[in-house]
Image: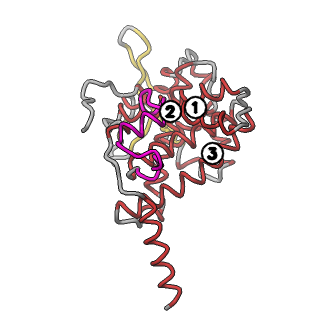
Amino acid sequence: MKTELTNIPKSIFEQIKRIDENGIEYWSARDIAKVLEYADYRNFEKVLDRAKEACANSNQEIDNHFVGFTEMVEIGSGAKRKLDSVKLSRYACYLVVQNADPSKEIVANGQTYFAVQTRIAEIRQMDEYNRLSTEDERRLFLRNELAKHNSQLADAAKLAGVIEPIDYAIFQNHGYMGLYGGLDAKAIHSRKGLKKSQKILDHMGSTELAANLFRATQTEEKLRRENVKGKNKANRTHFEVGAKVRKTIQELGGTMPENLPVADSIKKLEAKETNRLKKEEDK
């Protein structure tokens, strides 16, 4: 059953997105500066400089993501004048919010929004993923990605102080509760009609796996970036990231993960894939 989401407002970052004459999305640096509560654009230009440096350090062409242009800006009493600005790609916006003042709540919201959206774009642009033509192939791909990132998340959680297995289980539950509207692993099992022996991740479709992949990757990054210490803080971080991923799904008009259909066990697909590869090797 799909959740009714027609009355949920779009993210402010989605509202200020623009489309150029070629149908390409971009954000105005001056719009972003206002949303991120920089009263003086000159201070925001320092953030742009750090973002450009991060872009170069990531081996990306700066000119592909930061394009100077002139726009008409309202300066008061309805008057407007031409001012220099920058067209920002989605990736540029991601770098901008990563380098903005982290003490501002809107910056934290922007970090989650653009991190999730950038990750979605990355997956869609991955040659390997785009070659996948069936739901089964996408499930296998995303399940393997999630297994890899869950391992990295466990390492980050350990550095934060989540050491014992029981503590890690609690930590994971906080992430689920954020993403699934308060449902922990046991409640998700019940909601999905799964048996105790069945693993939640093994019965997710590609959409639900992608949502959990975003949760895992963004939590790992936040734990490391903010050098989170202590079990309680780590748990709270995981919950907050899960909740923000959920909010992004809402803003995009998606179906809540607890309402997505249960898929057949991925173990069957893995066995099928193993047999296929074995047959190819035997040829």
Mark positioned earlier in the residue sequence (3 or 2): 3
Q: Is residue 95 or residue 249 the one in the foreground?
A: 249
> Which residue is the site of mark 2?
242
**Left or right position of 202 against 39:** left
Query: What element does badge 1 sit on?
Result: helix
* Marks 2 and 1, how far apart at CA: 6 Å
Q: Position of residue 256 (x, y in %)?
A: 35, 36
Real-space CA distance between mark 1 and mark 3, rounded to the nearest whole angstrom: 27 Å
- Answer above or below: position of 272 versus 34: below
At 64% from the left and 43% from the top, the residue drawn is 153
Image quadrant for the N terminus?
top left
Q: What residue type is labelled 1?
A: His
> How is the rendered protein coloured?
secondary structure
Would you name the residue on which mark 3 appears?
55
Residue 166 colored in magenta in the image: no
Q: Tell me, yes or no, whether the two marked residues, 1 and 3, touch with CB atoms within 8 Å.
A: no
Marks 3 & 2, CB-CB < 8 Å contact: no
Amino acid type shown at disc 2: Gly
Which residue is at 64% across, 31% downward?
99
Nearest to the eye among marks 3 and 2: give it.
2
Q: Name the residue under label 1.
A: 238
Counting other residues with Cα less than 10 Å from the Cα at mark 3, is it few (<14), some (14-19), or many (20 or more)? many
Q: Does the magenta stretch include residue 196?
A: yes
Circle 2 Cα neighbour tier, 10 Å, few/some/many (<14 / 14–19 / ≥20): many
Q: Nearer the viewer, residue 280 or 214?
A: 280
Q: How crowded is mark 1: few (under 14 residues within 10 Å), some or many (20 or more)?
A: many
Going by the numbered disc 3, the residue's amino acid type is: Cys
Which residues, given as a range, are shown in magenta?
A: 177-203
Residue 110's x, y, as percent?
51, 29
83, 6: nearer the viewer: 6
**Could you tell me if the residues under marks 2 and 1 are in contact, i.e. CB atoms within 8 Å?**
yes
